[in-house]
Image (cartoon, grey):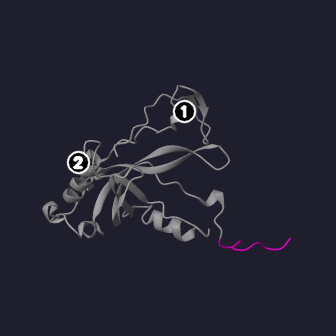
Amino acid sequence: MYKPNLFDDTQGYDEFEALELGGHICKILKVEETKSRSGKDMINIYIDIAEGRQKDYYLKSFQSDNRENKKYKGIVYQVVTDNNGNTNKGFKTFVDAVAKSNPGFNKDAIWGDNFSSHFKNKLIGGVFGREQYKNQNGELKWSTKCVKFRDVETIRKGVEVPEDKYLEIQKQSQSFSSQDGFEGVIDSDGDLPF
């Protein structure tokens, strides 16, 4: 057998370290204004872990991924308005958390053409939980995602780990086995705050 391409640079499965659940101090790398699939105003918030043992978690993961069409995984998608065209509570929470976490941040000055630029390199607290997904082989797996924002001080004081979010198909109180061997009964509404 010949040595396959990128063998020495490919990360094995046992080398992967999952992001710890709970609160993390995050740095906002970029905010993009975009539209949701249904046409609502939305922002994509690119974050990374700013402090602690898992600092730069998403950047390191991105840099170690040798796949051709790799993607940055530290993105939170936030809808700006609700179904009535009013401010979405998750969007308001995001802006308030940035303001409270960064002395001198002026919420009144962010509106207009340069909205996104006001958030670059700002700190924010992220609360991370597990979300179930189905992989390409149809297997149920778990990913860790930022499920809500809080101010940095709240994160430093400590936050509870959110309940797991199960796929819609799993919500009917069915028995399951997770990849870590835990068995139980699913009974979750699966709602996220954004």
Please give the name of the residue rendered at 69% of the width and 73% of the height, measured from the top-left corner. 8
Is residue 127 toward the left or the right of residue 169 in the image?
A: left
Mark 1: few, some, or many residues within 10 Å (few <14, many ≥20)?
some
Q: From the viewer's perspective, is residue 161 above or below residue 55?
A: above
**Which quarter of the figure has residue 176?**
top right
Furthest-front residue in view?
Answer: 39
Callout 2 amino acid:
Thr
Q: Residue beneath label 2, please?
A: 87
Q: Is residue 8 magenta?
A: yes
Is residue 131 toward the left or the right of residue 91 in the image?
A: right
Is there a contact, CB below 8 Å, between mark 2 and mark 1?
A: no
Please give the name of the residue rendered at 44% of the width and 51% of the height, measured from the top-left corner. 145
Q: Secondary structure at mark 2?
A: loop
Residue 146, percent from left and from top: 40, 51
Is residue 156 toward the left or the right of residue 4 in the image?
A: left
Closer to the observer: label 2 or label 1? 2
Callout 1 amino acid:
Gln
Mark 2: few, some, or many residues within 10 Å (few <14, many ≥20)?
few
Which of the two labelled residues, at mark 2 and mark 1, occupies the earlier sequence position?
2
Foreground residue, 184 or 70? 70
Q: From the viewer's perspective, is residue 6 above or below residue 188?
A: below
Q: Is residue 7 magenta?
A: yes
Q: Residue beneath label 1, please?
A: 170
Please give the name of the residue rendered at 24% of the width and 66% of the height, measured from the top-left corner. 115
Where are the magenta residues, as a range? 1-9
